[in-house]
Amino acid sequence: MVIFKHELKMNLKSLLIWSVCVGFTCFGCLILFGSLEESIEEMAGAYSNMGALSTAIGLDKISIATIEGFYATEIGLIFAIGGAMFAAMTAVVMLAKEEEGHTAEFLYTLPLGRGRVAVEKYAAMLALVLLFNGICILWSVAGFVLAGDLPPGKEFGLYHAAQLLMQLEVGSVCFLISAVSRKKQVGAALGFAVFLYVMDLVCRLIPDMENLKYVTPYYFSNAADIFTEKAVDQVMAGIGAVVLVVSAVAAFGIYTRRDLMA
């Protein structure tokens, strides 16, 4: 597990920066909720009357005046986009950096096959995403405690499980991009994570584009949907799991067969 440990060490700084930034933002917003209690009812009324935009954000289903509604509509958005961007950025450099940094020639002179290298790097990506989620959840729980309330346990757990699946799906697709690229495509990966969110907004705002929900993992991991329906859409989550597995298998297959630049 030398490669696995090396990748964890190399990405530790990035993990800490992203988890603290995203987690502390969620924590700060929860603390802020207490100071907004006097005006939150007026805000809830204004937000719920924004027409299609209210529907896209989920404010037609859950009230921002409750702490779980505030978490689902405001904080959930921060965590979703931040988590997807972290997973995308982490995964997209895992394999491509060896060619871009001209370290592939050294790495593959070691008694390690390409398959093992790819597996350990993928495992490192999974571990980093898990750690990111764990740290951010701790920040959120601390924020709820200090705010004097706790979210519904079932819905909170389902939401974060769906978020983890969403992030791993995005990470697997970006790992595949890394497997076919000779250079780190960080900008493209971050753009991809944001583009998927835009697709989620579009499919909720425009009825004719509803089928985009089968493409974007933000759809099944939407906090407002999960907190109101108390369940995750199993069909959409199943599609996400299939994309995750297919992307990972394709990355291994391509990377072990293609010519690498020294």
Image (cartoon, rainbow, N blue to C red):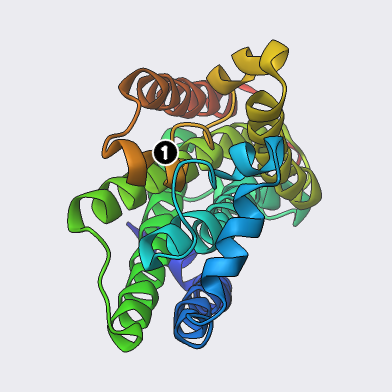
Q: Image point 49% across, 60% down: which residue?
A: 64
- Judge by depth and name the residue closer to the eye, 146 or 187: 146
In the figure, is residue 251 to the left or right of 61? right
- Judge by depth and name the residue closer to the eye, 214 or 65: 65
The amino acid at mark 1 is Asp
Q: Position of residue 105 (x, y in %)?
A: 66, 48
Whether residue 227 is situated above or below residue 65 in the rendered picture: above
Q: Image point 60% across, 49% down: which residue?
A: 48
Element class at badge 1:
helix
**From the image, which quarter does the C terminus lie in?**
top right
Q: Give the crowd class for mark 1: few <14, some 14-19, many >=20 residues within 10 Å.
A: many
In the figure, is residue 26 to the left or right of 45? left
**Seen from this angle, which residue lies furthest left?**
154
Q: Position of residue 171 (x, y in %)?
A: 53, 42
Q: Position of residue 50 (x, y in %)?
A: 70, 46
Q: Which residue was labeled with disc 1?
A: 225
Whether residue 10 is situated above or below residue 57 in the rendered picture: below
Specify whether residue 68 is in view: yes
Q: How many marks?
A: 1
Specify whether residue 259 is in view: no
In the figure, is residue 183 to the left or right of 1? right
Q: Position of residue 1 (x, y in %)?
A: 32, 56
Q: Image point 48% across, 35% down: which residue?
A: 169
In the figure, is residue 135 to the left or right of 191? left
Whether residue 29 is situated above or below residue 188 in the rendered picture: below
Q: Image point 46% across, 20% down: which residue?
A: 246
